[in-house]
Image (cartoon, rainbow, N blue to C red):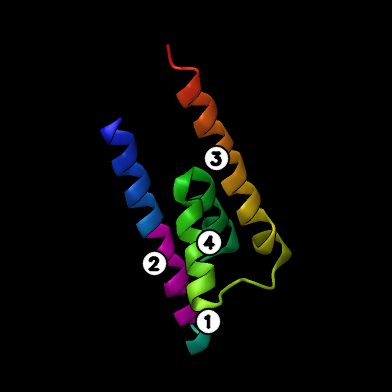
Amino acid sequence: MNIILGYLLAINIATFFLYGIDKYKARKGRWRISEATLLLMAVVGGSIGAWTGMRLWHHKTKHKKFKYGIPIIIILQVALAVYLITNID
């Protein structure tokens, strides 16, 4: 269980900073982190970091796949966690 919590903490911190880095690069007109990478980081466990990064840096908030996709990913991940926790023998 500690390994899972450590993983989730690390992936959310990494995702949070990726959104910040991408916003910085967008402002500077530099090479960007792909949307697929940003979404993948949310799917593999960094959804809270993605949502927090979107809110803090006002990044990707107008893109429908992020505006609606990230909250949907969070809901699905929470539902999966609740299911797993309540069904552990």
N-terminal label among 2 and 4: 2
User: Residue flagged by tag 3: what amino acid is it?
Assistant: Gln
Residue 61, placed above or below residue 46: below
Disc 4 + disc 1, Cβ < 8 Å: no
Give, as a single range, the part of the protein colored magenta.
Answer: 14-25
Measured in 3D between alpha carbons, the distance from the residue under mark 1 to the one under mark 2, in whole angstroms, is 14 Å
Residue 21 is covered by the magenta coloring: yes
Measured in 3D between alpha carbons, the distance from the residue under mark 1 to the one under mark 3, in whole angstroms, is 29 Å
Residue 77's tag is 3
User: Residue flagged by tag 2: what amino acid is it?
Assistant: Phe
In the rendered image, residue 11, in percent from the top left (x then y), is placed at: 38, 51
Would you say 9 lies left or right of 25 here? left
Q: Which is more toward the observer, 18 or 50?
A: 50
Q: Residues within 10 Å of mark 2 (few under 14, many from 20)?
A: some
Q: Quadrant of residue 61?
A: bottom right
In the rendered image, residue 43, in percent from the top left (x then y), is placed at: 54, 46
Residue 85's tag is none
Would you say 36 lies left or right of 6 here? right
In the rendered image, residue 46, in percent from the top left (x then y), is placed at: 46, 51
Residue 51's tag is 4
Mark 2, secondary structure of its residue: helix
Residue 64, placed above or below residue 70: below
Residue hosting label 2: 17
